[in-house]
Amino acid sequence: MFVSERGAPVSVEEFRKMLGRLSERVLGVTWHPHALRHACGVHLINSGADTRTMQQYLCHASHPKHAGLHGTHRATNVLSAFYQM
């Protein structure tokens, strides 16, 4: 999916390390690749997508943690509900 400056494929472990170093330098916290999925979900919700669309986009066809969410919520409400389950 990603290539290095030399054009070689970047392994999962290399990507994880690069993301961790970059996020620490820019944000002051270490992000992991899975956090990008969450960021994508937040972006979808904030852009007006309903939770079903978000589930399909992120390959969560049927997930119990998402069952009680409704498409009218904004990301803050959706994520709050998600993490309280």
Image: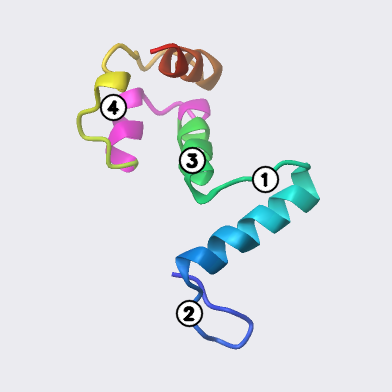
The structure residue drawn at horizontal position 51% and vertical position 22%, both measured from the top left corner, is 75
The 10 Å Cα crowd at callout 1, few under 14, some 14 to 19, many 20 or more, is: some
Q: Taking 23 as reference, is 80 above or below it?
A: above
Task: Return the mark for residue 52.
Answer: 4
Queried whether the magenta region covers residue 48, the answer comes back as: yes
Real-space Cα distance between discs 4 and 2?
33 Å
The answer to the question of whether label 3 and label 4 lie on touching residues, with beta carbons closer than 8 A, is no
* 60 with respect to 84 (left or right): left
The 10 Å Cα crowd at callout 4, few under 14, some 14 to 19, many 20 or more, is: some
The structure residue drawn at horizontal position 60% and vertical position 88%, both measured from the top left corner, is 6
Question: Which image quarter holds the C terminus?
Answer: top left
Real-space Cα distance between discs 3 and 1?
17 Å
Q: Identify the magenta region.
A: 45-57
In the rendered structure, which amino acid carries the disc numbered 4? Arg
SS category of the residue bearing label 3: helix
The answer to the question of whether label 4 and label 2 lie on touching residues, with beta carbons closer than 8 A, is no
The answer to the question of whether label 2 and label 1 lie on touching residues, with beta carbons closer than 8 A, is no
Residue 54's spot in the image, x, y percent?
36, 33
SS category of the residue bearing label 2: loop
Task: Return the mark for residue 9.
Answer: 2
Q: Which residue is mark 1?
A: 30
Instruction: Name the N-terminal-most of marks 2 and 3.
Output: 2
